[in-house]
Image (cartoon, helix red, strand yellow):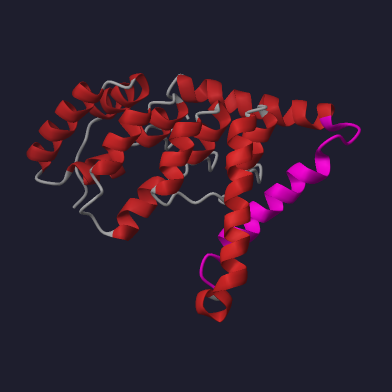
Amino acid sequence: MAPQISEDEIDDLLYAARTGDNDELTSLLSSLAEREHVSPAEILTTAKDEGKSTCLHMATGNGHTENVALLLSHFTSRPKAEKQAFLDAPNEYANTGLHWAALGGHLPVVKLLVEHGASVALANDKNYVPLDLASFGDKFDVVDYFLAQSGGLEEENALGGKQGEGEGEGEGEGLSGAVEGVRLHEGEEGEEEEGGDAKGKAKGKGKEKEGGSS
């Protein structure tokens, strides 16, 4: 049975994550988990606002690396699928925590999420992967990191052969497609106009994020 958490309690959790208050977040998770007889991970999985944003969205979008590490630590002893679902949980616009971290240019958070297995090739409702949002926002260090990751995926696919056939296929294809899009549009005429529109949309999501409403 899923934990029964009130809207006010969810708001408190999301606010603690958004402000990077680890002490408050730890206290809230501990008391709610004890009351509901569940793990803190189950509380985190359940706690979503009306826009389906989680504590991970709030922490990643605001660049709180230590806060993100704390959240993920609660999934260390949980099933791998449960952790993956939390990492890749989409909000109402299909943005994941990695989308928000990339949008904000929070490279340490991006690296932490990827190291923990966050999917780099999941697209949001505008068909943008995290690399796209970093590119639109001129977050070049994040873009460079994703480009390097893409090279690693291509090398793994080349070396893996049949052993890895089918595994991670969508991941490699999705990120490679975004990489090609970045490369093809570099220096092209009309890039500013296209990028401006996309950047505006991305920034809108960022503002909703900061208000905790998406």
Residue 169 among magenta residues: yes
Residue 48, quarter of picture: top left
Does residue 146 appear left or right of residue 112 in this picture?
A: right
Expressed as whole percent of the image width and height from the top left, the position of residue 158 reads 62, 70
Furthest residue toward bottom: 162
Q: Based on the displayed image, in which of its 4 quarters is residue 79 positioned?
A: bottom left
Part of the protein shown in magenta: 166-191
Whether residue 26 is situated above or below residue 130 in the rendered picture? above
Residue at image position (86%, 34%) is 187
Q: Residue at x 55, y 73 (%)?
A: 160
Q: Position of residue 25 (x, y in %)?
A: 23, 27
Which residue appears at 46% of the width and 46% of the height? 114
Total label count?
0
What residue occupies the far right of the structure in this picture?
189
- 118 in relation to 48, above or below: below
| Front residue (pair 64, 153) | 153
Magenta highlight: main SS: helix
Q: Relative to 11, is 144 on the left or the right? A: right
Comparing 140 with 3, the one in front is 140
Is residue 154 left or right of 38 when viewed as pictured?
A: right
Q: Is residue 135 above or below residue 178?
A: above
Q: Is residue 122 magenta?
A: no
| Residue drawn at x 55%, y 39% as measured from the top left | 93
User: Residue 72: where, in percent of width, then height?
Assistant: 30, 42
Q: Is residue 92 in sight in this rendering?
A: no
* Residue 178 x %, y %: 69, 48
Which of 211 and 19 lies nearest the eye of the viewer? Answer: 19
| Depth check, front residue: 150 or 201 | 150
